[in-house]
Image (tube, coloured by chain):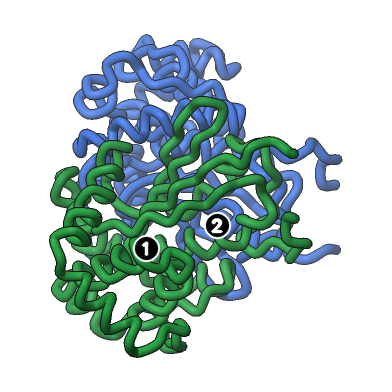
Chain colours: A blue, B green
Amino acid sequence: MGPVPRTLELFYDVLSPYSWLGFEVLCRYRNIWNINLQLRPSFIGGIMKDSGNKAPALIPRKGQYMANDIKLLRQHVQVPIQFPKDFFFVVLEKGSLSAMRFLTAVNLEHPEMLENVSRELWMRIWSRDEDITQPQSILAAAEKAGMSAEQAQGLLEKSSTSKVKNQLRETTEAACRYGAFGLPITVAHVDGQTHMIFGSDRMELLAYLLGEKWMGPVPPAVNARL
Amino acid sequence: MGPVPRTLELFYDVLSPYSWLGFEVLCRYRNIWNINLQLRPSFIGGIMKDSGNKAPALIPRKGQYMANDIKLLRQHVQVPIQFPKDFFFVVLEKGSLSAMRFLTAVNLEHPEMLENVSRELWMRIWSRAAEKAGMSAEQAQGLLEKSSTSKVKNQLRETTEAACRYGAFGLPITVAHVDGQTHMIFGSDRMELLAYLLGEKWMGPVPPAVNARL
């Protein structure tokens, strides 16, 4: 039996574009590196509040930078990411609480579906500029991910239970305890040490910490690890 | 004659640790990539004021993150960078105005010395291993005097304003002029993206030494 895979915890919120980029890169590497990728749906609003930080786009030049940055990263990382027309309304006003509660419910009941449903929610808000706050929006994403309407409806109902609300709160608090002031954060457990890495642009540093090879954000597809 | 080198302008302040890391990486690649690296000493205090941004370390968790990040990058990027013991005093109170005026004077009078003197200043603030930059005491004194002239103050102000016009909200920024387009890249952790824009190969922050471009 080979060496034990190293656990990487990815704390993310579908409201966060860089979370999507980090997510896709790590999903590509999960069959290349000796890692165990654990997805941790979190609530970026809670992290901002707890850390005293604010959304970067509130500084005009940072917002402008992000818009350009996302355009370039779309090509470089090969993810169909696009700024919503009304960024402030979508990101700063509507937010992501229901979506992240839904993903928390998915993770509790059908964790094998978490990756797909997360992706479909990102595709809605950060690719097709579609809503993710209304129940029918969330159900549409779940069904596109391969869930039956019944399953999706059941999870939507579970989303508003204390159990799910508390789980999202706990995951968000865990991110805060790791030192998060935003998302995404990747927490790598390597050789008895814990490293928290912020953002989607430190994956090469992560590879260095893991002693793995970095082959850029779009690594050549390799044989899945047996 | 080969293709025209692409101009990269690196706007930096020695107060900024990530400026040092970006600087060293670009200095390594200047003889590997087909680029013309132009160093632009700037004043980060002016950029923060003009953009409405604030030093990241004012958010406690960001300050904590930076401290850890710098420790890891020290090894990964192989630069002897270390948080000063009295970080808040050194970085947030003392600041860098005199140092950046001095570098502006160096750039006006002895641009060939700018790289070494910049590095020496970073070594003083951000490392324990300071060396001498190779300037004579006379030269240094002369430049120190020039630092407080209007000419130098204005030049620093202009360079800082240029960074602001490129959209800077902090430092370092690398402005790449490629195929008639201008790209502004913030930070020292986007060099792989820069390579992609230049159509060059990224070999990590410590590329194997190659024959200097003839």
Q: Residue at x 46, y 61 (%)?
A: A196
Q: Position of residue A104 (x, y in %)?
A: 42, 36
- Residue nearer the viewer, A21 or B146: B146
Please name the residue that numbered disc 1 is placed on.
Answer: B107
Label 2 Cα crowd, 10 Å radius (few <14 / some 14-19 / many 20+): many
Among the 4 quarters of the image, the one containing residue B52: top left
| Picture quarter with the C terminus of chain B | bottom right
Under circle 1, the secondary element is helix
Taking the image as shown, residue B120 lies to the left or right of residue B29, namely left
How far apart marks 1 and 2 lie (CA) works out to: 18 Å
Under circle 2, the secondary element is helix
Q: Residue at x 43, y 56 (%)?
A: B39
Q: Position of residue A44 (x, y in %)?
A: 31, 41
Q: Amino acid at mark 1?
A: Asn
Q: Are callouts 1 and 2 both on one chain?
A: yes
Taking the image as shown, residue A4 lies to the left or right of residue A139, namely right
Please name the residue that numbered disc 2 is placed on.
Answer: B26
Q: Amino acid at mark 2?
A: Leu
With respect to residue A175, does A3 lie above or below?
below
Q: Earlier in the sequence, mark 1 or mark 2?
A: 2
- Residue nearer the viewer, A109 or A40: A40
- The disc at residue B19 is none
Q: Nearer the viewer, mark 1 or mark 2?
A: 1
Q: Position of residue A216 (x, y in %)?
A: 67, 44
Q: Chain of mark 1?
A: B
Taking the image as shown, residue A208 lies to the left or right of residue B208, namely left
Tell me, yes or no, if residue B16 can be seen here.
no
| Picture quarter with the N terminus of chain B | top right
